[in-house]
Amino acid sequence: MANKLNQKSKSGLSRKYSHKLERQKINVRTKIRSIGNSRGIILSNKLLQKAGLAQDADIIVTAHNGQIIIVELKVQGVVNTDLSSWEKQFKQAIKKRNVSEKDLFEGIPNEFDQNEWTA
């Protein structure tokens, strides 16, 4: 009997291990629906919970070889979008002698810099 539990399945995993993986997965059958000029699917709360995704999570959606993969976007820190505080932050950084990023274009002029930035 122990041999039967440890026999390799077609995927190369033992049946015992493969069975544990199957218990961890949730398969949901759904349809692609029209939403305005786009298409969408409904993801159940149970599916989101099993994937460890919050209902309001920022995600990255990738399509490849007939699969759509959804991955949560993990933000390292909070992005400050309050422009009124940026000047203060720049002044603090200058006092601390923080240096700005290296110029990736190494001084190569571009149309934006010549026409817009210097205006």
Image (cartoon, rainbow, N blue to C red):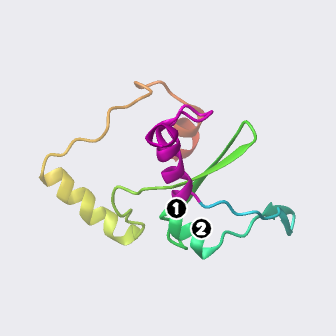
Q: Is residue 33 left or right of residue 100?
A: right
Residue to which mark 1 is pinned: 51
SS for tag 1? helix
Residue at x-position 33% and y-position 59%: 77
**Amino acid beneath label 2:** Leu
* Residue 69 horizontal/vertical position (percent): 62, 49
| Name of the residue lying farthest toward the left | 96
Q: Nearer the viewer, residue 113 or 86?
A: 86
Q: How many marks?
A: 2
Provide the residue span drawn in magenta.
Answer: 1-25
- Is residue 70 shown left or right of residue 86? right
Q: Nearer the viewer, residue 31 or 71?
A: 31
- Relative to 74, residue 113 above or below: above
Identify the residue at image location x=36%, y=64%: 78
Residue 16 percent coordinates (x, y): 48, 46
Q: Which residue is mark 2?
A: 47
